[in-house]
Image (tube, rainbow, N blue to C red):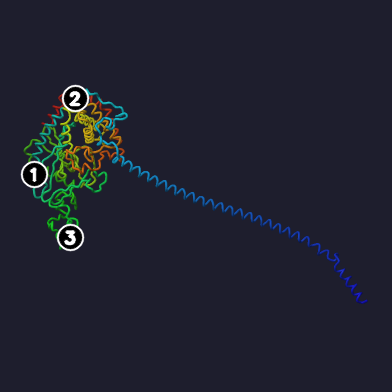
Amino acid sequence: MALGLFRVCLVVVTAIINHPLLFSRENATVPENEEEIIRKMQAHQEKLQLEQLRLEEELAQLAAEKEALEQTAVEGQQQNETRVAWDLWSTLCMILFLMIEVWRQDHQDGPSPECLGGDEDELPGLGGTPLRGLTLPDKATLNHFYERCIRGTTADAARTREFVEGFVDDLLESLRSLCNRDTDMEVEDFIGVESMYENWQVDRPLVCDLFVPFTPPEPYRFHPELWCSGRSVPLDRQGYGQIKVVRADDTLGCICDKTKLGEDMLCLLHGKSHMVQPGSEMEDLLCAKESPYLDTMQVMKWFQTALTRAWHRIAHKYEFDLAFGQLDTPGSLKIKFRSGKFMPFNLIPVIQCEDSDLYFVSHLPRGPSRWASASSTDWLLSFAVYERHFLRVTSKALPEGACHLSCLQIASFLLSKQSRLTGPNGLNNYHLKTALLHLLLARRTTDWKAGQLDARLQELLRFLEKSLLEKKLYHFFIGNRKVPEATGLPEAIRRAEPLNLFRPFVLQRSLYRKTVDSFYEMLRNAPALISEYSLHIPSDHASLAQKAVVL
């Protein structure tokens, strides 16, 4: 029974302990805590989501900024590359353009003045509107002008040449008598060249141009070196050469002149006395300082001094005075008569090129320079003797009274008058003569009859116009294989590259513009100028000029 009572008590106690009312308070707080925890967790989750969004926005912003910077860097690099490529392309284009322009002026294939045929359609400058539509006086006016104003010059030129040649003979003989044959240069007989000896001189006063060749004393000789002899020279040095002073027995092939021999070695061909050491000996031979090449300035000084001494020796024989016309030109002389009249002439020291009729000149006698020497050892090669010979031979084949020299005289007259109005320009008488020589070679002999003066004059001016517009007028002899072999021109000159006399116009734009403007202004003034001189110059104009130079 006690065990049963214990069991009953145990059930009652257990029931009381496990009754819900006893734990209502504690059990009531559990759901409330869970909801709050859940609410906090949701709030924290929302906060984390907002923070994540913010971070994502910042990351996206940073990525956008980084991408923008990278894009800017790439664009800048591309711009730099593009700018460098464009600058390089522009430079290459400019170089290519200059090369094409120089090539076009100097080496362009196609019809050129020296390759003209005999037909009129092949002559340059005959297409389009020639001479800008400007017209020249008719045939009758030109003939009247030539008879009244130019023809009398021919007779005056003959008398002037005779007087000057007689005096120069005496002057050079006096110069030779003062020279020491063992140490001084030897002066040879003069050679008449240019317009006075080609019978087309127009300008007054009449001026004789005389070449005076000279040679070195024994045992020396001059060895010319042409620009076309194989050595590389700039384009602006074409037409020049240098003159080396060597001993007469020098073959120019011995190594003793090119190699330093030892003290115990001796050249079997040449002794010690053969060696020419740079110094006072070479300077006495008119060479540049410490150089074996002849110096143009030294030659000018020597020639002026020699002429002065020669004149003082014979001055008492004459009733006139002799003076230098231009201080910077050694052979520019002027005879002054007591009446106040004067007679200019030019003595030009020259050196013969081998056995040909080519001569190296130290300077040009007058007028605008055709070329400008850059070095005092550069000598200009003159074809004056060949030009005179070609004109003489051609004149014999032309009809009697041919108009070729008349065309040249009228063109020279117009150019001279225009130069006095507007000043000198890039066009000179040598260009006129070169154009005429090309036409003489291209035209048939029957095209130069006296009655065709107006047609040939217009053709000459049209030839010059086209040459000016193309900036291309080739030298008549250099590189011109159309020249007859009978002229005796050296083969090296015939095979040389053609020399463009108008090449300076390619680089000197202001000079070119002035020359072209002066040329067309000369054409505009030509009719009025010719008419004025034809009507108002007295018929005895030539005789007055004759008295002026003879007295």
Label number found at residue 537: 2
Q: Which residue is mark 3?
A: 261
Residue positioned 10% across, 34% down in the render: 163
Mark 1 / mark 3, whichever is N-terminal: 1
Find residue 501 and report its horizontal and vertical position in percent.
25, 39
Task: Work out whether 337 lies above or below 293.
Answer: above
Q: State if disc 3 and disc 1 touch (CB < 8 Å).
A: no
Q: Residue furthest left?
A: 317
Front-lying residue, 123 or 417: 123
User: What is the quadrant of the N terminus in the image?
Assistant: bottom right
Amino acid carrying mark 3 in the image: Leu
Front-lying residue, 4 or 427: 4
Q: Left of 181 or right of it: where is 414?
A: right
Mark 3 / mark 2, whichever is N-terminal: 3
**Disc 3 from disc 2: Cα separation:** 75 Å
Front-lying residue, 350 or 383: 383
Callout 1: 10 Å neighbours few (<14), some, many (20+)?
some
Callout 3: 10 Å neighbours few (<14), some, many (20+)?
few
Q: Which residue is mark 1?
A: 176
Secondary element under disc 1, as helix, strand or loop, is helix
Find residue 311 and report its horizontal and vertical position in percent.
10, 41
Mark 1 / mark 2, whichever is N-terminal: 1
Label number found at residue 28: none
**Disc 1 from disc 3: Cα separation:** 40 Å
User: What is the quadrant of the C terminus in the image?
Assistant: top left
Amino acid carrying mark 1 in the image: Arg
Q: State if disc 2 and disc 1 touch (CB < 8 Å).
A: no
